[in-house]
């Protein structure tokens, strides 16, 4: 296991000994966002205190330096997921904008009336709604791959759902409510044999495990910086270069066009610049770059193993509390979805707040899934490299006393 | 002041009682004469409809139906108790006093009765909208009805 005590020294949110409701803050909402280490904050500040200038816009040293920094970030991000070239890395504002870009930029050019897009009921809104919209525009259909009773996708159900009309399959590598890990490589093979393209939502996977896009053979991969110790407002779309080359930009403007004239003629740069119109989030790229290096320094395999151990521990402790309903006991990642017995999820989260514990209640943006789970809402605890067993002990103790949930108000 | 003194134990019991056995939950058997307004928030799961029946300026009935947390359920149910039988003026006055209480401003506690159990909601700032959703929705309906001279 990693040593959270040592790791926390790098994080001001821990060093500052923050309190919530007069209790030491216990942060168990890492699936929504994560704390930032000093190196990330320093990188962002460095851009503003020593290196401010716009990218590809000037002929002077500062600007050259920023361009070099962005290029290096792109290279290091490519290396982080083992992409074959930095030109396959598009900087976006986050997972949502990455998936929207694929839906409009790729879906917009390949989808024909009657074509099918496959998703499933466990997907986040950002991997549902862009497909609804583009399907409506193109006369295509969004279909759902059935989940097993446990809420998982299986190869059998994928095979049954693929048809000759399937053009795109878009699935989360790790779902944000249940935290199940999808066998992406196996899925990619089947999806490609069916002639479709595989879009992977990596928002809950890339921050937590080693990723090799060449080995997985997915066609697109999206994720957000802020869920992996980086700043908000920066994310990545990885795409195979031959697919990116085909795509239309979703936003047009400065920094992405080669030329345009008064006759309405124009041409765009090659990817990734084609998809980065306007001044990009430079401080975000600096911060994301630092986060990638920090995570690599710790080791993605170690982080994944740490979270798995915490998950197993949490399952055991919550079961021992005798007062929890667990929804994803067998999930392979650091996401635990539960309810306190006979307590509405939102009330449970308020009660946890009164004990200083930050957990998320709700439908977790996968609104269709809750019909499947048979409960309008759940509580989600999600772990990361700095989460400790003591955090989980505090959670289990709170769950044990769940019937006192109205104490939060008195 | 209320005619009784509220202890935390009583407050808990009143909230739980209105949550587990709500008096005014459920869609009216006939919607004739009822206005309906949806209450929901981007901040929470609460998602319900408020039903209001007004005739000649008098509130004949108030109900609600949907998914809501304890605070939201109990506060909306108690709201219905408070406005039924009243007129625009008295109902809107009660709602304003309640919202003042939640926002920790001066308020007239003589009209709130059981709604006083929510006086501590400010302790859980994230739940303030839960305690007020039903009330602000009802206010909107009453104001509209009053304007239309219903």
Image: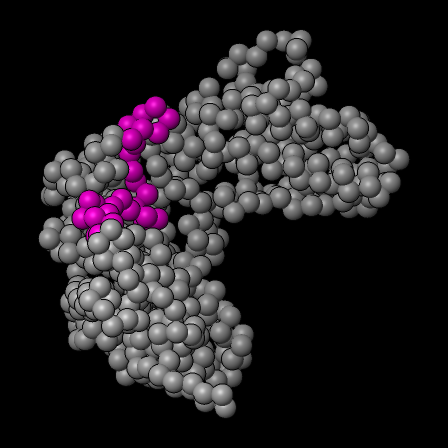
Residue A78 located left or right of residue B93 = left
Residue A148 x/y as whole percent: 36, 60
Residue A394 located left or right of residue A297 = right
Task: Specify the quadrant of the image occupied by residue B74.
Answer: top right
Residue A89 x/y as whole percent: 26, 71
User: Does the image show residue A330?
Assistant: no
For image coordinates 48% across by 84% down, the residue present is: A112
For image coordinates 35% across by 56% down, the residue present is: A233
> Farthest residue toward the right?
B56
For image coordinates 57% across by 27% down, the residue present is: B103
- The part of the chain drawn in magenta is A18-46
Residue A326 x/y as whole percent: 34, 42
Q: Is B108 situated above or below A148?
A: above
For image coordinates 49% across by 74% down, the residue present is: A134
User: Does the image show residue A255?
Assistant: yes
Q: Is B64 situated above or below A77?
A: above
Q: Is residue A37 magenta?
A: yes
Front residue (pair A407, B148): B148
Q: How many labels, in total? A: 0
Q: Is B89 situated above or below A368?
A: above
Task: Specify the quadrant of the image occupied by residue A325.
Answer: top left
Residue A102 located left or right of residue B60 = left
Residue A162 x/y as whole percent: 38, 77
Front residue (pair A365, B128): B128
> Farthest residue toward the front?
A60
Front residue (pair A262, A161): A262
Q: Is residue A6 magenta?
A: no
Q: Is A81 situated above or below A318?
A: below
Q: Identify the coloring.
A: one colour
Query: Which part of the image, by quadrant, shows the N terminus of chain A?
Result: top left
């Amino acid at each position: 296991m990693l040593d959270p005590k040592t790791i926390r020294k790098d994080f001001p949110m821990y060093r500052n000994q923050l309190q919530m409701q007069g209790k030491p803050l216990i942060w168990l909402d890492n699936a929504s966002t994560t704390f930032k280490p000093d190196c990330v904050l320093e990188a962002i500040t460095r851009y503003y205190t020593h290196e401010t200038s716009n990218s590809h816009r000037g002929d002077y040293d500062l600007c050259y330096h920023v361009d070099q920094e962005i290029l290096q970030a792109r290279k290091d991000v490519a290396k982080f997921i083992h992409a074959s070239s930095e030109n396959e890395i598009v900087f976006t504002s986050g997972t949502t904008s990455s998936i929207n870009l694929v839906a409009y930029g790729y879906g917009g050019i390949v989808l024909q009336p009657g074509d099918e897009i496959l998703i499933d009921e466990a997907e986040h809104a950002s991997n549902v709604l862009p497909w609804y919209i583009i399907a409506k525009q193109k006369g295509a259909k969004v279909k759902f791959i059935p989940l097993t009773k446990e809420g998982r996708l299986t190869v059998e159900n994928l095979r049954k759902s693929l048809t000759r009309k399937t053009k795109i399959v878009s699935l989360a590598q790790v779902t944000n409510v249940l935290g199940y890990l999808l066998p992406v490589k196996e899925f990619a093979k089947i999806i490609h044999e069916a002639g479709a393209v595989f879009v992977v939502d990596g928002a809950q996977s890339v921050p937590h495990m080693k990723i090799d896009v060449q080995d997985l053979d997915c066609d697109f991969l999206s994720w957000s910086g802020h869920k992996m110790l980086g700043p908000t407002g920066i994310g990545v779309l990885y795409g195979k270069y031959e697919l990116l080359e085909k795509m239309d930009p979703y936003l047009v403007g400065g920094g992405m066009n080669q030329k345009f004239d008064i006759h309405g003629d124009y041409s765009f740069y090659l990817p990734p610049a084609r998809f980065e119109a306007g001044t990009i989030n430079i401080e975000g790229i600096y911060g994301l770059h630092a986060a990638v290096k920090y995570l690599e320094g710790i080791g993605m395999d170690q982080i994944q193993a740490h979270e798995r151990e915490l998950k197993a521990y949490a399952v055991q402790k919550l079961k021992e509390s005798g007062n929890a309903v667990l929804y994803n006991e067998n999930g392979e990642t650091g996401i635990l979805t539960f309810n306190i017995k006979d307590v509405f999820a939102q009330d449970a989260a308020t009660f946890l707040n009164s004990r200083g514990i930050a957990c998320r209640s709700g439908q977790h943006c996968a609104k269709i899934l809750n019909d499947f789970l048979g409960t309008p809402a759940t509580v989600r605890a999600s772990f990361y490299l700095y989460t400790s067993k003591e955090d989980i002990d505090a959670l289990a103790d709170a769950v044990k006393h769940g019937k006192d949930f109205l104490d939060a108000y008195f | 002041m209320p005619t009784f003194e509220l202890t935390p134990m009583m407050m808990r019991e009143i909230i739980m009682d209105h949550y587990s056995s709500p008096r005014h939950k459920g869609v009216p058997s006939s919607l004739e004469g009822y206005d309906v307004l949806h209450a929901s928030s981007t901040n929470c799961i609460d998602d319900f409809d408020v039903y209001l029946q007004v005739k000649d300026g008098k509130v004949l009935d108030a109900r609600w139906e949907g998914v809501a947390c304890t605070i939201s359920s109990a506060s909306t149910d108690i709201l219905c108790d408070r406005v039924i039988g009243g007129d625009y003026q008295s109902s809107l006055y009660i709602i304003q006093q309640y919202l003042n209480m939640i926002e920790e401003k001066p308020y007239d506690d003589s009209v709130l009765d059981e709604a006083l159990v929510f006086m501590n909601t400010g302790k859980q700032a994230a739940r303030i909208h839960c305690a007020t959703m039903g009330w602000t929705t009802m206010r909107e309906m009453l104001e509209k009805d009053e304007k239309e001279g219903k």
